[in-house]
Amino acid sequence: MIHLAVFLCACASLLAPVASQDIFNNRESFSQSLTLARKIHTDVHALLSKYKEVHIGSKSFEDYSLLMSSLPTVNLKYTTWLDMEDSERLLVNFKDLHIFWIHVDAKRIYELESVPRSQLAQNMQEVLLDIRDLQYQMKHQLESLETPAPETLSQSVPDALLNPQNEWLSKLQGYIILRDLERYLGKVVRDFTLLRTKYQQ
């Protein structure tokens, strides 16, 4: 976790001169993406809480020893984060959010098969639509930085997600996916906070 004071120092140290035309093109875009990323983060936090209440039996349930190898890495070394280029931040987030999208969508479908008209499934769908909107914004931001987003990304769903060994394991998978997505979105918010600050100079 990056403490606020250290994070603000990092923002200041990373503020390099940016062409005025780039500032004009990206200032509003990064601000809009930050607002959307914060919204998704808040929505996923609420969804995770509700999911744990419904499927795990307690909103306070936490178990960070539970992992899924098919999900993107959530933890990032501070020095690695500090050294990333603008386009690299966007590209990594673009690809990783796609992986999370696939996992959440698989759980949404599983939820609907178990509980038609599930409110959890509806909430998942709303999050998925917002993630797609954010990715659309990121694609144009990458293009403005002369780094095209990938035209095609893998759509494959891990077999363990499609065919869980039992119902309890499936419920734990949903918890892990939403938990890690919430944590990852915290990094996305930090990235857009940095980018917005940089392009406001």
Image: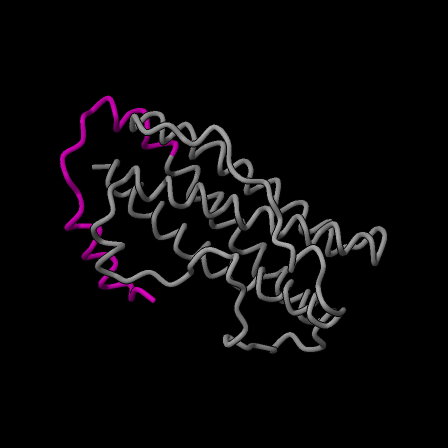
Residue 97 is left or right of residue 50, and the answer is left
Region of the chain picked out in magenta, as a range: 1-29
Q: Residue furthest right?
A: 116
Residue 184 is left or right of residue 124, and the answer is left
Residue at 36 percent across and 45 percent down: it is 192
Quick check: is 16 in the magenta stretch?
yes
Residue at 52 percent across and 43 percent down: it is 98
- Give the color scheme: rainbow, by chain, secondary structure or one colour: one colour
Residue at 73 percent across and 70 percent down: it is 55
Residue 138, how many percent across, how many down? 42, 35
Residue 28 image-quadrant placement: top left
Quick check: is 199 in the magenta stretch?
no
Q: Is residue 34 above or below residue 183?
A: above
Residue 93 is left or right of residue 166, and the answer is left
Instruction: Decide which of 184, 44 is in the foreground and name it.
Output: 184
The prevailing secondary structure element of the residues shown in magenta is: helix
